[in-house]
Image: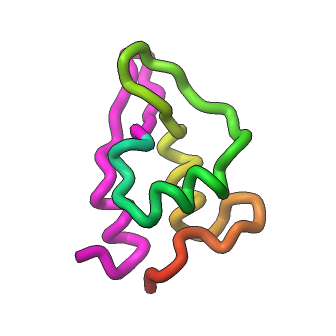
Amino acid sequence: MIKTKQQLFDAVPVQTMECGTRYVRVNDIPEPWRMQAQNDIRGCACPVVEGQGPLYYARDFQDWVQGRWWGTPGPKGLA
């Protein structure tokens, strides 16, 4: 069970493009935080990898988890 922000970040695998860009797949974020992330990070620039579905840059996801994403509180319900 995920109880902390670090556990959430650790639970989401980070992928790397051939060019070195690191990203996470939105579908790899466990609920209820997937929906929270989608609401809070909406409108940001996102990498595109064919066949991977919606993605976030790993750094943007990490900033969101740590509560540093443009004034959002980050994931709710975690220590």
Q: State the quadrant of the N terminus.
A: bottom left
User: Above or below — where is 29 with respect to 3?
Assistant: above
Please state the horizontal and vertical placement of residue 75, each as a whole percent of the image. 53, 70
Q: Position of residue 78 (x, y in %)?
A: 44, 81
Which residue appears farthest toward the bottom when viewing the image? 79
Q: Residue furthest left?
A: 1
Place of residue 55 in the rendered image (x, y in percent of width and height, measured from the top left): 49, 34
Rendered position, 38 above or below 64: above
Q: Is residue 66 above or below residue 4?
A: above
Nearest the viewer among 61 and 41 is: 41
Q: Residue at the spot x=68%, y=59% of the render?
A: 69
The residue lying toward the viewer, choosing from 58 and 44, is 44
- Looking at the image, residue 3 sits to the left or right of residue 79; the answer is left
Q: Is residue 21 magenta?
A: yes
- Whether the magenta-drawn stretch holds residue 20 is answered as yes
Placement of 63 over or under 2, stated as above or below: above
- Residue name at image x 32 percent, y 52 percent: 12
Residue at (29%, 74%) from the top-left corner?
A: 2
Give the quadrant of residue 71. Answer: bottom right
Q: What sort of colour scheme is used for the picture?
A: rainbow
Residue 35 in the figure: left or right of residue 15: right
Looking at the rendering, the stretch of residues picked out in magenta corresponds to 1-25
Indicate the quadrant containing the C terminus: top left, top right, bottom left or bottom right.
bottom left
Q: Position of residue 11 (x, y in %)?
A: 28, 59
Count of marks, rendered view: 0
